[in-house]
Image: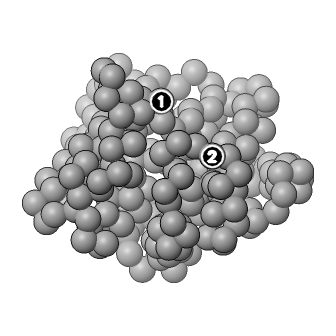
């Protein structure tokens, strides 16, 4: 249920619940991180709605975008923006919500990459930007912490080849390098866009077992547990 507060639409009675966004490049380990914390009580985990992006009433805008980004970039990113907004606004069922990426990275990383690479026409970019600006100016989308899984593009490329997702088969390492730089400029250098929350950086080039140790070592920071 939404109500109005200070001119913005907000969820009723949920302002005290923590929202933590897990950000990072493709194949940076976001799913492994979320699966690990999903075993903790009092944490609600929301993964990216990739299944929706692959099947919109029988259509696969994700696959189409990878095949022809100039034609299908706007189509996919409009739907990504909608589904991520839905994730942000859905009722929170636990004291802590962990989300895979956010509406902010959808715009600041992936829409921006399409536009800068010349694969999204100016008019498409302007329309998406106006939609995004209206959403963020009129709807409260609180984020309390961004956990940035920092990986090298080479590591992501090797992991991507191992997992063999159909839509990802044609992704070159240059694409991962560009996404990496956009993330670095946004969350580390802070030279591109506003960062909506504090950032916790976790080096994520390690093997899965070491990453699980990393998550445990940083558990209190990730879950924003206050020292008493």
Residue at 25% across, 71% down: 118
Residue at 69% across, 56% down: 159
Q: Is residue 213 left or right of residue 106?
A: right
Residue at 33% across, 44% down: 64
The residue carrying mark 1 is: 51
The residue carrying mark 2 is: 164
Q: Quadrant of the N terminus?
A: top left
Classed neighbour count for the residue bearing mark 1: other residues with Cα under 10 Å, few (<14), some (14–19), many (≥20): few
Snapshot quadrant of residue 90 = top left
Number of the front mark, 1 or 2: 2
Nearer to us in this view, 138 or 112: 112
Q: Is residue 198 left or right of residue 185?
A: right
Nearer to us in this view, 161 or 6: 161
Residue at 33% across, 39% down: 61
Task: Identify the element where label 2 is drawn.
Answer: loop
Q: Is residue 223 visible?
A: no
Q: Is residue 116 depicted above or below 51 in this figure?
A: below
């Amino acid at each position: 249920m939404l109500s109005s507060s200070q001119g913005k639409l907000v969820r009723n009675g949920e302002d005290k619940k923590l929202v933590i966004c897990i950000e990072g490049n493709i194949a940076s380990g976001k799913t492994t991180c979320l699966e690990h914390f999903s075993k903790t009580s009092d944490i609600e985990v929301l993964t990216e709605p990739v299944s929706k992006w692959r099947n919109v009433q029988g259509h696969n805008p994700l696959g189409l975008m990878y095949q022809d980004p100039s034609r299908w970039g706007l189509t996919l990113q409009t739907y990504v923006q909608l589904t991520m907004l839905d994730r942000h606004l859905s009722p929170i069922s636990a004291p802590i919500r962990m989300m895979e990426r956010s509406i902010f990275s959808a715009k600041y990383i992936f829409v921006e990459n399409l536009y800068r690479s010349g694969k999204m026409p100016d008019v498409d970019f302007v329309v998406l930007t106006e939609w995004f600006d209206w959403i963020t100016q009129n709807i409260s989308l609180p984020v309390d912490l961004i956990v940035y899984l920092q990986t090298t593009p080479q590591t992501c490329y090797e992991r991507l080849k191992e997992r063999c997702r159909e839509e990802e088969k044609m992704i070159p390492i240059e694409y991962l390098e560009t996404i990496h730089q956009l993330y670095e400029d946004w969350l580390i250098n802070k030279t591109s866009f506003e960062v909506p929350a504090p950032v916790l950086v976790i080096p994520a080039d390690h093997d899965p077992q070491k990453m699980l140790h990393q998550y445990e070592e940083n558990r209190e920071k990730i879950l924003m547990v206050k020292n008493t």
